[in-house]
């Protein structure tokens, strides 16, 4: 049985605070399996408990109460289980009360000072806010306090516009938004801006150590739910494994996510559930993560970004 | 990327109704990743939401109510989710277990679905003489069995004795009692995860020897036993992972003898890896409890292993 242990490396530990849906793959359910595959234990604190995500048309269930989130965090703390997380991921948060609780009880607590903090400030997309206005205001307020080092923040273009107050429609305005952002939020070390559309082409923009760069993103011919959460999961893994090299980790993440989306589209394009269209593209409510096992494990190609600064 | 889809394994789907802990591996946390590695789409419905399992001595969190669970089920019905299998484990109390029953019976009886749904009911109540659920769940388990919709049950010896209302001390009685499950409750496979050798005259081995005993309608004339040496250490979530593995193998192999053998063999390997990394064996409430958690992630390449390490022992019925 000795050969059993060959190649086994103890798994790392991540605390992930995001949504849970029973059916489908968004929030924690989109990043847990990919990160498990990549040798991470994922401790999940759920912010919702829903039957499915809204993309399925109908759902039931609840946002988790701040008291339960508080209790779960304190249960971990009582046993000193909270100080062995290499990474803390914060994803979808359903209410401003929950955001405040998580900020105070997790991020402002000394026991996590060695953890890498990665936040996806989920607020909206394509010009639309899809959380409460209180959450948007609170995110800006908390980030402006500059009390906590955030190793990586991953807003999409619209969320970057909300955080910086600058409308982005050109590389010039992108640089301006980043200038404003970096002056205002001084404790955010790295930023990735996803789903940036300039002149009808999609990009992913990164800023790290004063440099600003981008990769072009090949667009898949469908719209997916959960792709942002998957992106967050893969980026987390690559970011840690490359010792926080944002260029390499971003490039690999873009390529891995593209493979999963392509495969999910191939599997689902003739499915009876893929009849709905969004912006004239077929809508695929659930990523095919189980079928994507090999794509998720493959080493993705690396090339240099285009530098804007 | 051409041909990308050609070698993709077909997935099956399971609704797994068990506990959720933030840290550690029991219930849904112990079952879901192995099943995902075995090409199952796993929908997780959580019966509790706790910081960690009770082995640590303290925990915080809450249990889902009957209405929480039934509300989610209404949502699943609205979008016509269908499953190949149901995996049910720990429920803390009477109400929750009743809801679990309502959900599973609802899915098994869904006339709109063409799927033949397999229900594995792990009658989680206790172990080694200690009951760790409310006493009032016992009649609910019996009621679920009376629905005649349960396909597989996986009690340990203690749970079996609770379901039967009396102790089992010889294989002769055991053989007769199995008829109850097959004939009255229409259960296809009964997998007794642990029989203690020292309680049975006919079984060789001392207190450290366990047997896994199978009674199945597909092998009507005998009991099948597997002799297992206990691995030292305090492990949790073993039963939950074992049930998940059994569900996978029974579904895929359609032959209870190799199915059980493979599930036991995988489990032995997982425990070997876990023990290797745990250092010294822990004890209940030990501060090192976290070192004894099943190494669910590290074992990812073991779950699909088809090695059969055990020699089945056949006892004529």
Image (cartoon, grey):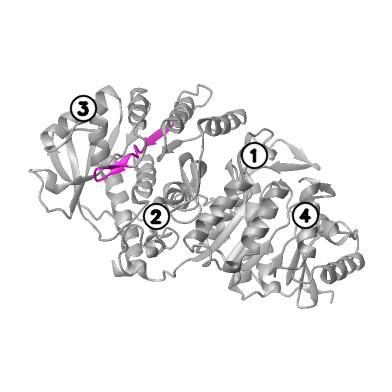
Distance CA(mark 3)–CA(mark 2): 40 Å
| Residue A269 at x, y percent in the picture | 66, 42
> What chain does mark 2 sit on?
B
Q: Disc 3, disc 4: CB below 8 Å?
A: no
> What chain does mark 1 sit on?
A
In the depicted structure, whether residue A32 falls above or below residue B201:
below
- Does any portion of residue A231 appear in the rendered image? no
| Picture mark count | 4
- Residue for point 38% across, 42% down: B247
Distance CA(mark 1)–CA(mark 3): 47 Å
The residue to which callout 3 is attached is: B179
Distance CA(mark 4)–CA(mark 1): 43 Å
Drawn side of residue B12 relative to residue B269, left or right:
right
Identify the mark at residue B57; answer none if there is no mark. Answer: 2
Does residue B198 show up magenta in the picture?
no
Identify the mark at residue A270; answer none if there is no mark. Answer: 1
The residue closer to the viewer here, B106 or B219, is B106
Q: Disc 1, disc 2: CB below 8 Å?
A: no
Identify the mark at residue A138; answer none if there is no mark. Answer: 4
Number of other residues with Cα within 10 Å of mark 1, as a class: few under 14, some 14 to 19, many 20 or more: few
Q: Which residues are magenta?
A: B117-131
> What chain does mark 3 sit on?
B
- Residue for point 80% across, 68% down: A185
């Amino acid at each position: 049985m000795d050969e059993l242990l060959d190649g086994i490396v103890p798994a790392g530990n991540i605390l992930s605070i995001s949504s849970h849906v029973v059916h489908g793959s968004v929030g924690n359910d989109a990043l847990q399996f990919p990160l498990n595959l990549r040798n991470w234990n994922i401790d999940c604190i759920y912010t919702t408990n829903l039957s499915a995500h809204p993309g399925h048309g109908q759902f039931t269930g609840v946002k988790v109460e701040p008291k339960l989130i508080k209790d779960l965090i304190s249960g971990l703390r009582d046993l000193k289980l909270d100080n062995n997380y290499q990474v803390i991921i914060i994803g979808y948060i359903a209410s401003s009360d929950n955001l405040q609780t998580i900020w105070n009880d997790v991020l402002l607590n000394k026991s996590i000072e060695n953890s890498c903090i990665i936040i996806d400030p989920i607020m909206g997309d394509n010009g639309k806010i899809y959380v409460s206005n209180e959450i948007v205001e609170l995110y800006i307020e908390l980030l402006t306090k500059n009390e906590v080092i955030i190793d990586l923040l991953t807003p999409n273009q619209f969320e970057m516009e909300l955080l910086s107050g600058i409308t982005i429609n050109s590389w010039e305005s992108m640089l301006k938004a980043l200038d404003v952002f970096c002056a205002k939020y001084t404790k955010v070390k790295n930023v990735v801006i996803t789903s940036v559309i300039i002149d009808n082409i999609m990009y992913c923009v990164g800023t790290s150590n004063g440099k600003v760069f981008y990769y072009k993103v090949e667009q898949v011919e469908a719209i997916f739910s959960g792709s942002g959460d998957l992106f967050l999961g893969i980026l987390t893994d690559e970011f840690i494994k490359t010792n926080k090299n944002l260029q390499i980790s971003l490039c690999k993440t873009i390529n891995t996510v593209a493979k999963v989306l392509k495969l999910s589209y191939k599997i689902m394009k003739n499915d009876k559930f893929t009849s709905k269209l969004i912006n004239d593209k077929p809508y695929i409510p659930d990523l095919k993560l189980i079928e994507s096992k090999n794509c998720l494990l493959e080493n993705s190609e690396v090339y240099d970004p285009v530098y804007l600064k | 990327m051409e041909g990308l889809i050609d070698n993709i394994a077909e997935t099956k789907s399971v609704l797994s109704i068990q506990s959720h802990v933030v840290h550690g591996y029991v219930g849904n946390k112990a079952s879901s990743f192995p099943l995902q590695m075995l090409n199952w789409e796993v929908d997780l419905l959580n019966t509790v939401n706790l910081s960690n399992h009770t082995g640590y001595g303290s925990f915080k969190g809450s249990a889902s109510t009957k209405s929480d669970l039934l509300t989610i089920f209404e949502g699943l019905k609205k979008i016509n989710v269908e499953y190949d299998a149901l995996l049910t484990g720990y429920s803390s109390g009477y109400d929750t277990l009743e809801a679990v029953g309502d959900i599973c019976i609802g899915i098994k009886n869904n006339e709109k679905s063409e799927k033949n749904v397999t229900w594995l009911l792990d009658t989680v109540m206790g172990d080694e003489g200690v009951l760790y659920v409310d006493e009032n769940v016992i009649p609910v388990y019996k009621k679920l069995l009376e629905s005649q919709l349960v396909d597989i049950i996986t009690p340990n010896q203690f749970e079996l004795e609770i379901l039967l209302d009396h102790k089992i001390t010889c294989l002769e009685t055991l053989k007769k009692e199995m008829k109850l499950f097959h004939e009255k409750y229409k259960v296809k496979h009964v997998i007794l995860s642990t029989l203690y050798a020292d309680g049975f005259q006919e079984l060789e081995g001392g207190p450290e020897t366990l047997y896994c005993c199978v009674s199945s309608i597909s092998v009507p004339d005998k009991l099948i036993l597997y002799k297992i040496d206990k691995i030292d250490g305090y492990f949790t979530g073993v039963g939950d992972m074992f049930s998940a593995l059994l569900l996978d193998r029974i579904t895929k192999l359609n032959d209870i003898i190799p199915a059980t053998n493979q599930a036991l063999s995988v489990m032995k390997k997982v425990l070997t890896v876990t023990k290797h990394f745990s250092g010294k064996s822990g004890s209940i409430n030990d501060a090192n409890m976290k070192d004894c958690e099943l190494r669910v992630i590290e074992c990812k390449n073991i779950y699909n292993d088809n090695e059969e390490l055990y020699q089945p022992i056949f006892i004529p019925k």
